[in-house]
Image: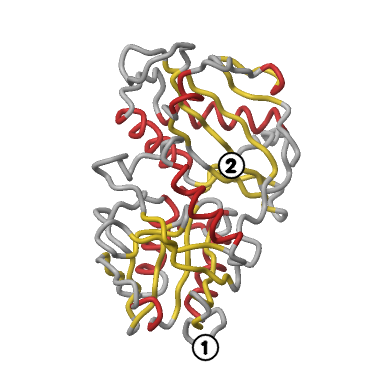
Amino acid sequence: MILPKYAYFQGKFVPYGEAKLGLLTHSLNYGTAAFAGIRAYWNDEEEQLFVFRPLDHYERLLNSGKLLCAEVPHTNGDLRDITLELLRMEGYREDCYIRPLLYKADEIIGVKLHGLTDELAICALPFHKYVEHDDSAHVTISSWRRVDDNAIPARGKFSGAYVNTAFVKTDALRGGFDEALVLNQDGHLAEGSAENVFMLRGGVLVTPSITENILEGITRRTVIELAREEFGLEVIERPIDRTEVFLCQELFLTGTAAQVTAVTQVDFRPIGEGVMGPVTSRMRKIYDDAVRGRLPRYSHWAEPVYLKEAVAVK
């Protein structure tokens, strides 16, 4: 993995190697941090790097911060601007991944959320495929359950909660699968290990509602809008029983890292014809066009990084 050259750390831009934390840092010991995952996409035709929906990602990060009793002296617009400047400093001309981290910075022993110093750091690095077989993923239904909102708020993107994700993903990979589906405490389908999930059944696109202990995904929101506006599909948010996925025509996962990942088998059972279906294939294409700033109707989602030089008026 190629490491970044720079980071935004403790209120300023520094060389990445200087962004260091002590071993007693509260968030390192107790998981008291929230983070975001944001992608930026290179468009060869325009020679431009586009950050996808940064304001929405930072709004969710700030909401996660509220749940952590964090005090952040920035708006989502401020954080977008810092991110754009950081990317200009890096000079990337390829797809990359942006990692903002909001964390409890005090070096103390003791578990709490209030009365602590909150810091924010951001870095970015080149990044391409997250799920290796993203056009034909074979997944399993995990024995682990999704964290419950009454234990760790499911709609917050908290560092500590991702131990749950690590259990799920590790077991899936060690079992020879590409990914996993996770049930909630009621036995309904919640998510992938770190992705939202959609199934096509009877011509209707179905996804778990935000009350099913899911992360309220930015990519999920994007796919719902594209399915309704561009495909004319009915989209329903409701509980999904475990065995429904074995009977659906198409199944796919969505997330900033996973993008739109086609699922073609669940626990060795083929989904539909056992190959990526037409709705999933079309969604992958239109999503890629949207994130790279190729769709004028959705240009507000794609934030350009590099400033175009003004053309001199003769």
Residue visible at 35% across and 34% down in the picture: 64
User: Which label was assigned to residue 204?
Assistant: none
Give the residue at x 47% y 49%. 165
308, above or below 274, in the image = above
Give x and y (percent) for residue 160: 43, 35
In the rendered image, the vertical position of residue 196 relative to residue 236, given as above or below: above
Give the secondary structure at mark 2: strand
Residue at 33% across, 20% down: 112
Label 2: few (<14), some (14–19) or many (≥20) C-alpha neighbours in 10 Å:
many
Q: Position of residue 180 (x, y in %)?
A: 49, 62
Q: Which residue is mark 1?
A: 273
Q: Quadrant of residue 174?
A: bottom right
- Where does the C terminus fall, quadrant-wise? top right
Tell me the quarter of the image containing the N terminus. top right
Q: Is residue 213 left or right of residue 264?
A: left
Q: Amino acid at mark 2?
A: Pro
In the picture, measured across the screen, residue 103 lies left or right of residue 42, that is: left
At x 56% / y 51%, what residue is drawn? Answer: 257
At mark 1, the secondary structure is loop
Residue 271 x/y as whole percent: 48, 81
- How crowded pointer 1 is (Cα within 10 Å; few <14, some 14-19, many 20+) is rated as few
* Number of the front mark, 1 or 2: 1
Kindly identify the amino acid type of the residue bearing the numbered disc 1.
Answer: Glu
Residue that numbered label 2 is attached to:
304
Quarter of the view holding residue 77: top left
| As drawn, 260 above or below 244 | above
Residue in front for this viewpoint, 199 or 242: 242
